[in-house]
Image: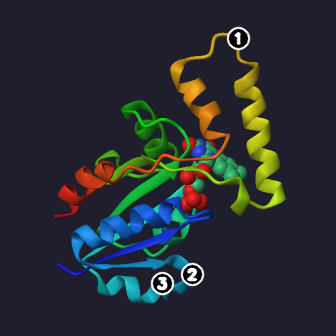
Amino acid sequence: MKRIVVYQSGTGFTAKYADWIAQDLGCEAKEYKNVNPGELAGFDMVIYGGWIFGGMVVGYDKIKACNLSNVVVFGVGMTVPSDEIAEKLSEQNQIPRDRFFYYEGGYNPKKLGIMKKIIVNMVKKSVEKKENKTADDLHTLETFKGADRTNKEAIEALVAYCR
Ligand SMILES: Cc1cc2nc3c(=O)[nH]c(=O)nc-3n(C[C@H](O)[C@H](O)[C@H](O)COP(=O)(O)O)c2cc1C
């Protein structure tokens, strides 16, 4: 089966997952900006990965517009992974649940532009203000200090699905 991994990554975490997945599936990983959308129809399966911005998988709209028949998607965000968050993101982004995988990326402020930093700081402040912080809130506050939470084992289910 001819497969390709296509991704959009702002600060490198999604790129890391894309490379791991491509390596395990024995195919190429390409950044979306280096892909000619027309070439995607020539693959039996397209695995698309985008970082999460305001609950949306960045760039997925462009892949959807290609009307491909066999697309598997992964989203990479800062939220602690759970079935609930994966369910919510698959609904919000209108991706069939069995074809969507959510991974924890991280936070690298050094690679972010000023506007994005401002948005992240607003979210950070709202978590800091919460009175009864959950374990996940505390984990997120730690991530805001700058952290790489990528986990290679997390890709196993997607790789098994694609095979
Ligand atoms: C402006 C902005 C908005 C974000 N919104 C979300 C979000 O809604 N949900 C989430 O889980 N993570 C969110 N994040 C965190 C990123 O998705 C996370 O840092 C991810 O690992 C970035 O991946 P990348 O390195 O491939 O760009 C946001 C980050 C930024 C900068």
Q: Residues within 10 Å of mark 2 (few under 14, many from 20)?
A: few
Looking at the image, residue 62 sits to the left or right of residue 97; the answer is right
Q: Nearer the viewer, mark 3 or mark 2?
A: 2
Q: Give percent across and percent down for residue 4.
A: 33, 77
Q: Residue at x 82, y 47 (%)?
A: 118
Q: Nearer the viewer, mark 1 or mark 2?
A: 1
Q: Residue at x 47, y 37 (%)?
A: 88
Residue underneath mark 1: 131
Specify the quadrant of the image occupied by residue 20: bottom left
Looking at the image, residue 160 sits to the left or right of residue 155; the answer is left
Q: Residues within 10 Å of mark 1 (few under 14, many from 20)?
A: few
Q: Give percent across and percent down for residue 75.
A: 47, 53
Q: Residue at x 52, y 77 (%)?
A: 32
Looking at the image, residue 132 sits to the left or right of residue 46; the answer is right
> Is the CB of mark 3 within 8 Å of ligand 1?
no
Mark 1 residue element:
loop
The dot on residue 37 is: 3
Residue 55 visible to the viewer: no
Q: Give percent across and percent down for residue 145.
A: 67, 40
